[in-house]
Amino acid sequence: MKQFINILFLLILVTQSIAQHQEQPFKSNQKHKIKQWEILDILLTANTIKNPFKDSSTVIFTNSSGNKLVLPLIYNGNTNNKSEWLIRFSSAIIGTWTFITQSEHSSLDKKEGTVTILPNKDHKGGVRLSKEDTRNFYYESGEKYTPIAFECDWLYALDYHNEKKLSKTNHLLNLIKKNGFNQIVMNVFSYDVSWKKDEKLAAHPQHEFGGPENIFPFLGTNDTPDFSSLNVDFFKKYDRTLLAMHERQLFAHIMIYVWNKLVKWPDMQSDADNLYYDYVIKRYQAFPNVLWDVSKEALYYGRADEAYISERIQRIRKQDSYKRLITVHDYGFCKKHGDEVDYISSQDWSHNIYNKTLEAYTTFKNKPIFNIEHGGYETSDYTVFTGDYTNAEVCLRRNYMCLFAGAGTTYYWQGTSWNVVVYNPFQQPEDSYKPKFDYFQYLSSFWKQFVDEDLKPAPWMNSSGYALANKKGLQLHYVPKENFQIKLGWVLKPEKDKIKTYYWFNTLTGETTTPKPAKGQGYINPWRYEADAILVSKITEK
């Protein structure tokens, strides 16, 4: 039965992958049809153009309601002494759009056509903010979205040299999706780590992706960069990865820069720096699953200052016609420049991450909070980067602490987060370490039950754990396994003419049970000393 379910899950993913992207050659006045949030690439061929990355050719999309999108024509490399260009388009708005190109080059100018957008029942679209509920993210389809993210910095490299297939990438993405994650925190490009590598990696080169040969977003290599132009082939390969994620409704939290992974970046605000940064925005803004992040740990490592990061944010806003959400992987910057970002990225390793995250939640009352790194890095067969916490249960608890403090959260496994990528951990030898991805499958399934319940942190309701509550009498009480009991008293006492129902949820197994506490005693975790649990209490009319 389990094997049948896994096969069915993969078939669903394959079905989705057929529907979320189309690529078509340009034909004059052709009528295209795509679904909402499906990505359409229309390929144009033109004469060779000098300085194509700096070219200002555009395509203007207009619909019958007067909505207008001005998008860049995207240079896509040269073939047979001709230059190739992309019209890359997606839309959340149903109806017909007309388009026309504008260019000083005759071979690119006045190219016209129409695109009809049909409803898409298989996709929820991008992520947006809400004026009515400023605390939370929402899909464009209208459903509430809570980030449960998975960091994988070297995802771009898994199948880079495989011209035909994304075998490793798809396998890992299927695992990530199956286990309840809905976002991947990732770089555009990372080169290598600066710390000492586990000696065991020498015997397992298939898991080492640091220091990749012949992979670089500019010409040349990371060791001998040529900043005069960009490597279009790198971005074509990156397209494949983002499309594979879009097909699975996995959001790409793209950190455009990363300072501490030995990348030979051009000087800040140089022509090469702007060329790279602008091209990333141009090429990927039409992807509904994209979230922008200027840089990982933006103000660390003595490179960038606040003025530079602010300028980069404005650079995105000026060029991104889709207005994808922007943050900065640097709580110090977000704390001082909260009005410049769309949501706050928090990064804190302290033992009491709950209070730290709650502080961010109460400070920024009108923006979502996303804990992008909480110091928990689950162990693997290789010691890659330990942070301060490696035990799987402790790492899981820290994710729950973030959720119960009102924030989205991110999971790190040492086997996938950095230069080491064990893309198929459950197919490794029997004695190898198997990551506890299933913990997050249970977490995600549990969380989905309450996503529309308007739950808010309620620390006063639980003296020795964490609590969420709404105004309708629903309460979630997180109980660490070390607790002997929790005394909630009046908190769970129903009003007259109402009844109380409750059950326990095991965070490690996903089990539920509904034992009744002994009269006069506190509420005792049925898995006390074995697993953290959540007591779900609901008060309803009799």
Image: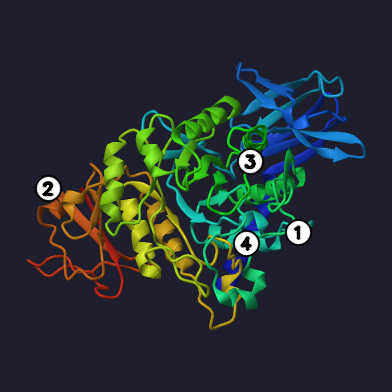
Judging from the image, what secondary structure is the residue with disc 4 in? Answer: loop
Judging from the image, what secondary structure is the residue with disc 3 in? Answer: loop
Q: CA distance from mark 1 to mark 4?
A: 14 Å
Q: Residues within 10 Å of mark 3 (few under 14, many from 20)?
A: some
Q: Is residue 520 left or right of residue 80?
A: left
> Label for residue 210?
4
- Label 1 vs 2, first from the N-terminus: 1
Q: Is residue 122 left or right of residue 517?
A: right
Q: Is residue 425 left or right of residue 455?
A: right
Judging from the image, what secondary structure is the residue with disc 2 in? Answer: loop
* Residue 4 vs residue 164, the one in the foreground: 164
Q: Residues within 10 Å of mark 1 (few under 14, many from 20)?
A: few
* Residue 197 vs residue 407, the one in the foreground: 197
Q: Amino acid at mark 1?
A: His
- Label 2 vs 3, first from the N-terminus: 3
From the top left corner, tell me how far across and down residue 160 is, in percent. 72, 56
Q: CA distance from mark 2 to mark 3?
A: 65 Å
Foreground: disc 1 or disc 4: 4
Q: CA distance from mark 3 to mark 1?
A: 25 Å
> Label for residue 266?
3
Residue at which label 2 appears: 495
- Whether residue 244 is visible: yes
Foreground: disc 2 or disc 4: 4
> Which residue is painted at 50% across and 61% down in the image?
179
Judging from the image, what secondary structure is the residue with disc 1 in? Answer: loop
* Residue 375 vs residue 429, the one in the foreground: 375
Residues at discs 1 and 2 in contact (Cβ within 8 Å): no
Which residue lies most toward the bottom here?
431
Foreground: disc 4 or disc 3: 3
Residue at which label 1 appears: 161
Q: Relative to residue 113, is residue 454 depicted above or below?
A: below
From the top left corner, tell me how far across and down residue 71 is, in percent. 67, 26
